[in-house]
Structures are given as C-alpha cells and as structure tokens.
C-alpha cells in the first residue's frame, strides 16, 4: 500500500500536521514521502538505549506497518559491537584459567557471571527491539534460531566425548552424562543429584542460559506494558528478588552446590543484563570510562579474593560481580569511545570472543583428561596445551560448523518471510552478541526554502 500524499498522509502517519520524523534524512513537503524513514542503530554501539515509546506504533489490519505502508518488523541489518565480543574473551579467559589452576585465578569462576550479564543484555535488546517494531515476538522463530546457533556445536562436542569416554573416562556413565547435557538439564541434575559427572560439569551454565531463553520472550511481552524507566525499575526489582532468593536458599539448605548450579538461584545476572538493555540512558564518554574501569577493577578484586565453594560468591561477592558486569556492559553499549572499549576491540581479543562458546564447550573435558585428580591443578605446560587445543578446535568448529549454520538460519528466516513485499529483513549475524534497535527521532519541520539555499 502506498503512502497518501500531502497533509492527509502526514496526519495519518504522525497525528500532527507538520511533523518531520526522520533520521539522517528529511521529509520533502512536496511529496510527503520520506527520503530515509528508517535507520537501524546498533543497540550495543550506536544507540542511547531502546526507547519503546519513541517508536511510532502504526497498525493496520492488526499488523505493524512501516511509514510507507508495508508490513515490517523494523529490524534491519546489524553491526557487531567488537568490544562486547572482547568482553566475552575476558570472561572465557577467566574461566579457563580457573579450571586449569585455581591458585592462579582463585575467583576465575566469575567469568560465568560476566557471560550471564552479557547474555541477558543481548537477548533482551533483540527481543525488546522486535516487540517495539512488530508489537509481538515470534516465539517459534526465536527458539529455532537459538537452537541452530547453539545446539549443533554442543552435539558435536558431546559426540566427541562419547567417542573417547571409554578410553579416557572409563568409569563415567558417558551416555547418561551426554543425555543430560544435550537436553540442557545439567543445572538441576548437577545441583540435586551430582550428575553429569566432572568431565561435563561445565554444561550447567549452558542449561541456565537455555532456561532463560525459554522463558524470556514471554517476560518481554509482559514487560513491554511498561515503557522506558518503568521497565528498568521492574527488572531491578526482579534482580533484587532473585538475589534475595539465592541468599535465602543458601541459608536454608547450607549447600553450596545446590544453590550454585540452579537456574532459579543464578538468574540474577541475566536479569540485571536485561535491565541494562531497557535502560533509556547511555553514558557519555567520561561516565563510560569511569563505569568500565570501575567494573574491571571490581572484577579483578573478585578474581583475587573470592574463594570457590564458600558462601561469599553467592552472597555479597555475587552481588558485586553482577553489578560490576552490568557496569562494564553499560559502558560498552553506548556510543562513547573509551580506552576500555579500545582494548577490548583489538582483533585477537575480538576473535577469541567470537569463538568463546566453542572454547567453553571443549576446554573442560580436555582439562579433566590431563588432570592427575578431580581437583588437581595443571602445570604451566599442560595449561598451555589446553589453551592451544581448545582454541584450535574452537576455531575449526566456528569455521565449519557454526558459521555455515548461521547462514542456514538466515536462509530459513528469509524463506519464512517470502510473500511479504517491501519488508526489511533482519541480519542473521546475531550470534548471542549483537542486536538491532530502531530509533525514531522527531525533528523540527524542515524548511524547503532553507534547503533550497
């Protein structure tokens, strides 16, 4: 459907007689057609936060329409935020260091908390943008894209584990362990029954995130009833409630393992990352620099002082790490250029961040195979072998498994949208590390005479 011309079209689209909605463009009053109506701003790099109330909600026949009348979801090509990929590299580095030698990085397990905050931010940004531009969320498509992105690499690592388990881990119930890990049940099974055994123990965090993916689209639909700061405060209250529940659960059970591994007791970081995503504010350069440095200092303090299998990581230490991770994400999510963002955007660091998922999958079974005992630390030489082997296998997995499947996901999405004319299609470049948001900015009426000059 074409846009009506003249004053009627302007009144239909904006509800005002002389509005000039544009971004990097203008509306020519002679045609009432946009020179450029829609521009995608990368939620992690270029925007100042998702403002759902700033997105005009034109609906025709129950469908969201763009200003030219064509149905559309409003999410266009996206651009990666290299600094957030770099933050993933920091997180995986801490986790690998902790698993290799706890004496070197006694608090390295906080890398998982950084992953949680980052995942909460990214997934919420993507779902928030989709809800803002379409009025709904395509649950099935979201779950399918998550499965295509994450499950094949996990299945490959589990297949390799099953192949070598009779030789390397002869006393493990390998089939049972792989079954629990492959179905993302290892968070609760590990908490209550101590399975899967040590070599697949690390899959608990994958299960926590999988449960988050399962529930969060519905949460975003409910949360969309609140706009801007109200949504932020709702999630802050949810973060406080989740943190309080973890502390209560630890106090009632006095069981570190039962509290540490479960989704319901470890979702606070995911929620806080989501709160950062809906916050309608992004820091200036000075604020971003301060937040980034403060967050990294807090993470460094946690790395040196937190002790594994104590109450501190689940109480005051856990709160500190969640807040520090959120500060770093907030500092990197805005348009401000900082030293921290520059450091995390270095190419080697960014590449490690992009393959961090596969590194996480592969490094732990290799470490367990080289350990002299379940809790023994590795030598420096053995640690270097683990790092080299994990990066090599992860790079191959990313190149030949993950990237082709990302293209498959893109093709599926494009086919699912065939028949809808003039629609902008989203990039399938989202890999758990980027998202799109649409920003509509009002401008003063554009003067044709001024432009003619």
Image (cartoon, rainbow, N blue to C red):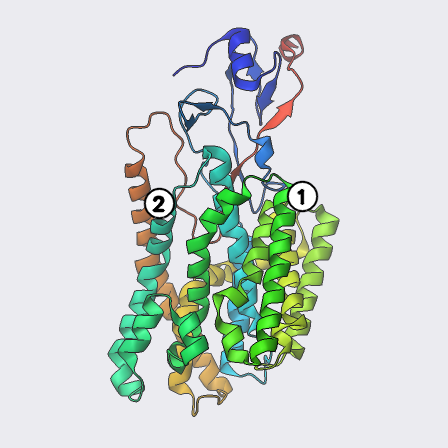
Marks 2 and 1, the one that precedes in the sequence: 2
- Secondary structure type for disc 2: helix
Answer with the quarter of the image where residue 53 lies: top right
Considering every residue shown, the one lying at the far bottom of the view is: 372
* Residue carrying label 2: 141
Q: Position of residue 324 (x, y in %)?
A: 66, 62
**In the depicted view, which residue is nearer to us: 345 or 182?**
182
**Residue drawn at 25 percent across, 85 percent down:** 166
* Left or right for 189, reference 109: left
**Residue drawn at 54 percent across, 67 percent down:** 265
Q: Position of residue 70 (x, y in %)?
A: 40, 23
Cα distance between the residues tagged 2 and 1: 29 Å
Quadrant where the C terminus is found in the figure: top right
* Residue 394: assigned label: none
Q: Position of residue 155 (x, y in %)?
A: 30, 66
**Residue drawn at 34 percent across, 46 percent down:** 140
* Residue carrying label 1: 281
**In the depicted view, which residue is nearer to us: 143 or 231?**
231
Judge whether 172 appears above or below 291 on screen. Answer: below
């Amino acid at each position: 459907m074409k846009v009506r011309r003249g004053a009627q079209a302007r009144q239909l689209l904006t509800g005002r007689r002389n509005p000039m909605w544009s971004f990097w463009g203008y509306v020519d009053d002679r045609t009432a057609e946009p020179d450029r109506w829609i521009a995608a701003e990368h939620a992690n790099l270029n925007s100042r936060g998702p403002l759902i109330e700033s997105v005009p909600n034109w609906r025709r026949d129950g469908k969201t329409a763009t200003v030219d009348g064509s149905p559309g979801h409003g999410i266009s090509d996206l651009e990666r935020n290299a600094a957030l990929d770099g933050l993933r590299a920091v997180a995986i580095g801490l986790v690998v260091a902790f698993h290799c030698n706890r004496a070197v990085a006694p608090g390295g397990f906080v890398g998982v908390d950084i992953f949680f905050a980052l995942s909460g931010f990214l997934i919420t940004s993507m779902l928030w943008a989709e809800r803002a531009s379409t009025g709904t969320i395509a649950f099935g498509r979201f779950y399918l894209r998550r499965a295509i992105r994450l499950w094949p690499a996990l299945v490959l690592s589990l297949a390799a584990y099953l192949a070598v388990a009779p030789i390397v881990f002869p006393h493990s119930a390998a089939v049972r362990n792989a079954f629990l890990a492959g179905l993302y049940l290892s968070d609760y099974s590990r908490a209550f029954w101590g399975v899967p055994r040590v070599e697949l123990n690390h899959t608990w965090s994958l299960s926590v995130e999988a449960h988050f993916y399962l529930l969060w689209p519905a949460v975003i639909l409910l949360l969309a009833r609140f706009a801007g700061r109200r949504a932020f405060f709702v999630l802050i209250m949810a973060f406080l409630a989740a943190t309080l529940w973890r502390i209560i659960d630890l106090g009632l059970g006095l069981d570190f393992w039962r509290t540490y591994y479960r989704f319901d007791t470890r979702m606070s970081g995911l929620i806080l990352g989501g709160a950062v995503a809906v916050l309608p504010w992004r820091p200036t350069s000075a604020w971003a620099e301060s937040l980034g440095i403060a967050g990294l200092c807090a993470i460094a303090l946690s790395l040196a002082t937190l002790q594994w299998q104590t109450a501190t990581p689940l109480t005051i230490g856990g709160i500190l790490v969640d807040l520090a991770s959120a500060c770093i994400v907030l500092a990197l999510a805005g348009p401000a250029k900082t030293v921290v963002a520059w450091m995390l955007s270095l190419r080697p660091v960014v590449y490690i961040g992009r393959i961090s998922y596969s590194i996480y999958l592969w490094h732990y079974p290799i470490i367990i195979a080289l350990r002299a005992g379940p809790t023994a630390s590795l030598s420096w030489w053995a640690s270097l072998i683990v790092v080299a082997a994990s990066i090599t296998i992860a790079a191959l997995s990313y190149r030949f498994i993950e990237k082709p499947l990302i293209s498959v996901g893109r093709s599926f999405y494009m086919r699912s949208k065939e028949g809808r004319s003039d629609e902008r299609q989203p990039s399938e470049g989202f890999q758990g590390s980027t998202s799109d948001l649409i920003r509509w900015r009002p401008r003063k009426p554009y003067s044709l005479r001024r432009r003619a000059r």
